[in-house]
Image (cartoon, rainbow, N blue to C red):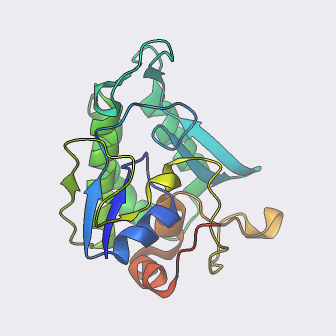
């Protein structure tokens, strides 16, 4: 299967399901940026339940911009806030300390564009999971994908997918299992079993 998908901020599990079950991946980078999506949003499991974190961007609806041209707003210490949120949510998870050092470049390197951060996060997480993926990139935007399975709807926050197999999460006893969070939730809780978990699942858009 050849798949077309958006690079997103610490992709959710559904994104990685599409990726691991594909023969080739093409990242959509030629579209106009849209707000309220996973391009700059990540959902994790905090002490009070699902927690949404966002990377601030410089974007207005009036002046359309290509996804690849949207800059990160630097006035906030977003990297420090993101790191602290992950530490608070996952410091007690089995594999947080094992992987967090590999991810520190995401919190210590200056990124000017949201796409650059998303691509780097994908690269680092893929290495942590030990996935050998060399994505291609779109040159032009096509509304209807040709010769590819179109998983671009996964970038929208209101896209629903099937319930995934449960695994133990840090706060399961408090709030129950929360499906399809960021891949970080799976990685920090399941560690080396992450790839096997992904390969066991089947993705269905609802």
Residue in front for this viewpoint, 179 or 103: 179
**In screen coordinates, is 118 left or right of 178?**
left
Residue furthest to the right? 174
Q: Position of residue 87 (x, y in %)?
A: 53, 48
Q: How many marks?
A: 0
Name the spot of residue 153 as percent of width and height, x first: 51, 53
Instruction: Note whether 178 is above or below 46 in the view shown.
Output: below
Judge whether 70 appears above or below 164 on screen: above
Q: Position of residue 148 (x, y in %)?
A: 32, 66
Residue 91 drawn above or below residue 190: above
Residue 102 visible in image: no
Q: Nearer the viewer, residue 77 or 6?
A: 6
Residue at image position (66%, 79%) is: 166
Counting from the top left corner in percent of width and height, residue 30 is at: 28, 38
Residue in front for this viewpoint, 171 or 179: 179
Could you tell me which quadrant the N terminus lies in?
bottom left
- Quadrant housing residue 196: bottom left
**Residue 182 seen anywhere in this rendered image of the structure:** yes
- At 42% across and 66% down in the image, what residue appears? 16
Quadrant where the C terminus is found in the figure: bottom right
Q: Residue at x 51, y 65 (%)?
A: 14
Horizontal side of residue 136 vs 131, given as left or right: left
Residue nearer the viewer, 140 or 55: 140
């Amino acid at each position: 299967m050849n798949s077309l998908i958006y690079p997103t901020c610490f992709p959710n599990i559904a994104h990685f399901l599409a990726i691991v079950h594909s023969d080739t991946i093409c990242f959509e980078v030629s579209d106009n940026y849209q707000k309220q999506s996973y391009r700059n949003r990540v959902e994790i499991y905090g002490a009070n339940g699902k927690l949404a974190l966002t990377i601030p961007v410089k974007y207005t609806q009036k002046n359309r911009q290509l996804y690849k041209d949207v800059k990160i707003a630097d006035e906030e210490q977003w990297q420090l806030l993101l790191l602290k949120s992950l530490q608070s949510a996952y410091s007690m998870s089995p594999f947080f300390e094992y992987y967090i050092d590999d991810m520190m470049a995401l919190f210590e390197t200056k990124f000017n564009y949201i796409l650059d951060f998303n691509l780097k996060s994908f690269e680092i997480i893929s290495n942590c999971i030990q996935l050998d993926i060399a994505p291609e990139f779109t040159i032009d935007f096509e509304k209807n994908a040709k010769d590819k399975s179109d998983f671009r709807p996964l970038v929208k926050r209101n896209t629903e997918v099937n319930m995934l197999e449960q695994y133990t999460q840090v706060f399961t006893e408090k709030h129950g299992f929360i499906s399809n969070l960021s891949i970080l939730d799976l990685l920090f809780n399941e560690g080396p079993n992450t790839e096997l978990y992904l390969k066991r699942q089947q993705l269905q858009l609802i």
